[in-house]
Image (cartoon, rainbow, N blue to C red):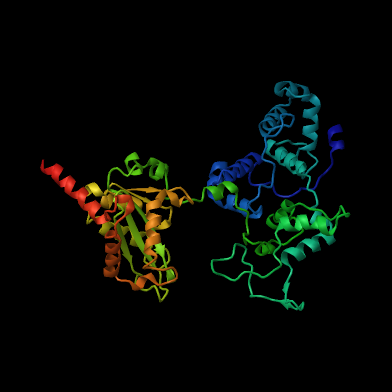
Amino acid sequence: MELRAQRGLMRSPGRPPVAQRQQRVLFWLAIAEGLSSSGAADRAGVPHPIGTRWFRNAGGMPPLDLSQLSGRFLSLEEREEIAILHAQKLGVRAIGRALGRAPSTISRELRRNASTRTSDLSYRGSTAQWHAERRATRPKTSKLASNDRLRDYVQERLAGHIAHPNGSAVVGPQTRWIGRRHGRRQDRRWASAWSPEQIANRLKVDFPHDGSMRISHEAIYQALYIQGRGALKRELVACLRTGRALRVPRARRQASGKHFLSAEVMITARPVEAADRAIPGHWEGDLILGLGSSAIGTLVERSTRYTMLLHLPRLPGHEKGSRAKNGPALTGHGAEAVRDAITVTIATLPDHLRRSLTWDQGSEMSQHAQLSIDTGLQVYFCDPQSPWQRGTNENTNGLLRQYFPKGTDLCRHSKEDLEAVALALNSRPRKTLDWRTPAEALDDHLLSTMQQVLH
């Protein structure tokens, strides 16, 4: 009766969460590792829709501290043990001895975190954990929500209208907030578009002696991305230069590279014989681009500098814009078109001249595995932003710009035109070949190989 007198009828604070704190921590740790919302939900053991809801409602930002709780706090396992021992009519001292806790800790736990809808002190571990987590949140009013002048300043610099030199406002294109990032080649909202970092640092210039007009750029981002902060509306993320409706975890951005790449196909795995140019048969390739998504493929042999050009005409339906969703690229230099063009061109060479091909990390080579099966040509990829790793090909592309200038439509050239240009390059004497031509160097190699076979 004394316990009942200390604890009266309480109103229920609402529905318990769908998962415990441990599951939410596991979810956000997985997000920090670069996993998708579905993958993180699997890691935490919750349904995929729950994980997606957590990520979107929090704006991609963890809403709780991910560090491990101190041992001074009761855990869910301890609370479940307390519930079992309490149901067995054990006293607080006996329960405390069993758990290695002070009797006052057990007594306080039974009073504070018991049932809420009645004055009955029935104790359940999951309910007690819910009460403890709810009480530990201690929500704090954000600075933007409590300071109207600061909020107006931030919102004006972030989402204010732009104006003509005479001061009249410019409305800009009409846009609609759809709850996610703007689509490709879609109009964006015209606004002042100061970045949160610019706003945070400009406050010190405009209000040097007013300490109340201070806020960090991270607090502005949180006010935009996290729902329920009560300061800035989520649709104002459209005024950010990225236009992202959700914050993308850093690890996910780093892991968003080319999915067709692996350590086995990187240039570091390429044979040493390809680097020293001693043995012909190792090629470098790339695309030169022109007007209207036109392109020509280039293949250059590293040892002899022999050049072959790939004819990549636009596919039927390109001008009409009738490309099927998830269908092949109609520009002519999609993955399937480049794979087929290399297969046809490289098949004209003997097997010993089809050793390897080094390319940059363009998506046009995402079919490299099938290319290797069809031709026996092992494909390797350069490191990002490292054109010097294909120096021979880059130099050849510079020579080809004499015939195929930038800003011109490269699809107007026929296959016969490309063969003529390739012949012109292969007939030029090269200083690096002791003034022999690439064609002569390749012929000498083929003749030497034939003589070795005959003898």
Residue 260, percent from left and from top: 41, 50
Q: Which image quarter holds the N terminus?
A: top right
Residue at 40% of width from left, 75% of height from top?
319
Front residue (pair 85, 48):
48
Query: Which residue extends farthest left?
Result: 454
Location of the C terminus by quadrant is: top left
Q: Is residue 9 left or right of residue 450?
A: right
> Which residue is more in the foreground, 437 or 14?
437
Q: Position of residue 172 (x, y in %)?
A: 66, 75
Residue 421 image point, x, y percent: 30, 65
* Image vertical order of residue 189 relative to residue 12, above or below: below
Above or below 190: residue 256:
above
**Residue at horizontal 26 percent and vertical 59 percent from the top:** 344
Q: Is residue 397 visible?
A: yes
Name the foreground residue: 379 vs 262.
Answer: 379
365 or 124: which is nearer to us?
365
Where residue 238 appears, x then y in whole percent? 65, 64
**Would residue 153 appear left or right of 178 to someone viewing this image?**
right
How many numbered marks have been drawn onto this rendered protein structure? Answer: 0
Is residue 1 visible to us here?
no
